[in-house]
Image: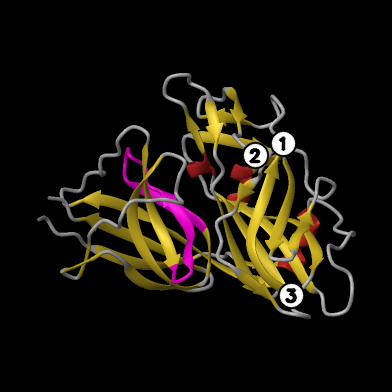
Amino acid sequence: MQQARLSTVPVVSAVVLSLALLFSGCGGGGDSPAGDGDGAVTARIVLTDAPRSDIQEVHVHIVRIEAVSDAGTVLLVGDEDIPNDIELMALAADPMLLGERNLPPGSYTQLRMIVNDAPGTNYIIDGDGVRHDLTVPSGPQTGIKLLTSRFTATEGSTITILLDFDAAASVHQAGRSGQWIMRPTVFANIIQGVQISLGTIRGTVLDAAGEPLPVPEERMLGVFVETEEGVVAVGEVSPEDGTFEIATVVAGDYDLTVRYADAGDWENPDEPLQLDVEGALVQAIAFLLGADQTLDLQIVVATE
């Protein structure tokens, strides 16, 4: 078996966000709280996205975002708060504050996003500048389940809900029909407080010969950023040159894995591939991402 190596090079990058500064980019007023009264939790909802090189723009109309608990469903932001047209690719460099709500304290099991699927509402601009309409299966009916673990909103606290709308994983072109389909992949990070410290993870995933790994049709290769609770972010690896970038990751301790998955389905990936760190084969690499830090990773995957 051929061995693999990984190295990290820290690079300073100014990506600490204070949400007080983001209010100027808010999509709405946020004047209608979801849960009035003493002891309510203040929840701020911020939307960001990962870059994608082969698509210039991705436009979506998000109707509302909800939090689900055993007691019922709470509206976080609605159509009056959210712009009718959000260009996702621009959010990698400029996250958008969608709104602020009072949230009843308690335990929440799920976050859900409802997308308008009216013809012509959602679309992309491809690398050649051509517009293509997007189809969003089940978006306006059952909603899109956001990828997050159960979280608790403590009475009197302030939380930030950072929604990472991964357009790279969400948008693909159907092989036979040529139709562009969006099966949204949205990772939700729940952060205590009003200030978010972010870092960036980027680099390459190559085989021992320095070549990109093969990616079969209708499959994807991704770099997964994980905690004990689950996956918090994924960066798709380019089949052309092996590069990847995860532009906004909350500073903290993580494990990194490299996995294949079916196109549009980061939620159910394959088992991790074997990586080599200083001569030892491992499936997961533990690392600390600091605030204002960019990690450049050179990952070589073991191949038979």
CA separation in Å, label 3 and label 1: 29 Å
The residue tagged with tag 2: helix, strand or loop? loop
Q: Residues within 10 Å of mark 2 (few under 14, many from 20)?
A: many
Q: Residues within 10 Å of mark 3 (few under 14, many from 20)?
A: some
Percent across and percent down for residue 66 are: 72, 55
Q: Residue at x 21, y 62 (%)?
A: 5
Which comes before the other along the chain, label 3 or label 2? 2
Magenta stretch, residue numbers: 227-247
Amino acid type at mark 3: Thr
Amino acid carrying label 2: it is Gly
Q: Work out whether residue 183 or residue 253 is closer to the camera in this orientation and state it.
A: 183
| Relative to 252, residue 266 above or below | above
Residue 159 sits above or below residue 2 on the image: below
Residue underneath mark 3:
158
Q: Mark 2 highlights which residue?
A: 139
Cβ atoms at labels 3 and 1 below 8 Å apart: no
Q: Residues within 10 Å of mark 1 (few under 14, many from 20)?
A: some
In the picture, measured across the screen, residue 164 lies left or right of residue 11, that is right
Element under disc 1: loop
| Magenta-drawn stretch contains 218 | no
- For mark 1, what is the residue? 116
- Residue positioned 89% across, 69% down in the render: 36
